[in-house]
Every structure is written in C-alpha cells, then in structure tokens.
C-alpha cells in the first residue's frame, strides 16, 4: 500500500495529538491545555467529532484532577465535552 503525502500528514498530526495528550496527564501547563483545546475545536468544526471527543475527555479529566470537580473551569470543560457527545448522538 502506497502512503500518500496527505496520509503522512494525518499520521503526523495524530502522533502529535497523542504526544500532547500523554504530556497533559497531571500537567497544569496552560499553554499545552489551550493548544489541545484548539485542536479539539478544529476537529469539531470540520466534523471530526470522535477525535474531538477523545481530546475533550482528556481535557475534562485534566481539569478535574488539577482544579477539582466543582471548579468553574472544570464544569466548563464538562459542558464542552457533553456538547461534542450530543453531536455524535
């Protein structure tokens, strides 16, 4: 099977997202968090709800772990996670 340039770009993007999600575990770096949030939003904008959902679940878990379950930022992430779930059905 021949790998196309586009296929290589998709694989590179997926690898970068996976590395970012792994780095997010237990990390309260706001820049990393915001970058991953932007990626999730881009996925959603272009119909990649399943990919967005994976990222949103990790973002929510991160906020819950770092800030606590009832923190306003954690609750906002939960709302955004539920919104993506609603689009998937």
Image (cartoon, helix red, strand yellow):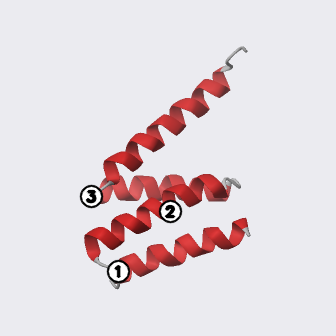
Q: Left or right: where does residue 47 sit relative to residue 63?
A: right
Q: How many residues crowd mark 3 within 10 Å: few (<14), some (14–19), many (20+)?
A: few
The residue to which callout 1 is attached is 69
Q: Left or right: where does residue 44 sit relative to residue 74?
A: right
- Indicate whether 70 appears above or below 44: below
Which of the labelled discs sits on residue 56, or is there none? 2
Q: Is the Cβ of the residue at disc 2 closer than 8 Å to that at disc 3?
A: no
Percent x, y for residue 8?
A: 60, 24
**Furthest-top residue in view?**
2
**In front: mark 1 or mark 2?**
1
Q: Is the Cβ of the residue at disc 1 closer than 8 Å to that at disc 2?
A: no
Secondary structure of the residue carrying tag 2 is: helix
**Which quadrant of the structure image shows residue 9?**
top right
Residue occupying image coordinates x 61% and y 74%: 83
Residue occupying image coordinates x 50% and y 62%: 56
The residue to which callout 3 is attached is 26
Label 1, label 2: how many angstroms apart (C-alpha)?
15 Å
Secondary structure of the residue carrying tag 1 is: loop
- Indicate whether 88 appears above or below 20: below
Residue occupying image coordinates x 54% and y 70%: 81
Q: Compare marks 1 and 2 and give the one earlier in the sequence.
A: 2
Percent x, y for residue 11?
A: 57, 31
Q: How many residues crowd mark 1 within 10 Å: few (<14), some (14–19), many (20+)?
A: some
Secondary structure of the residue carrying tag 3 is: loop
């Amino acid at each position: 099977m021949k790998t196309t340039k586009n296929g290589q770009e998709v694989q590179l993007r997926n690898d970068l997202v996976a590395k970012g999600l792994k780095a997010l575990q237990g990390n309260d770096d706001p820049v990393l968090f915001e970058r991953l949030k932007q990626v999730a939003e881009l996925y959603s904008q272009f119909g990649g709800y399943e990919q967005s959902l994976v990222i949103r679940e990790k973002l929510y878990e991160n906020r819950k772990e770092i800030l606590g379950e009832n923190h306003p930022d954690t609750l906002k992430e939960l709302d955004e996670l539920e919104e993506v779930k609603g689009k998937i059905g």
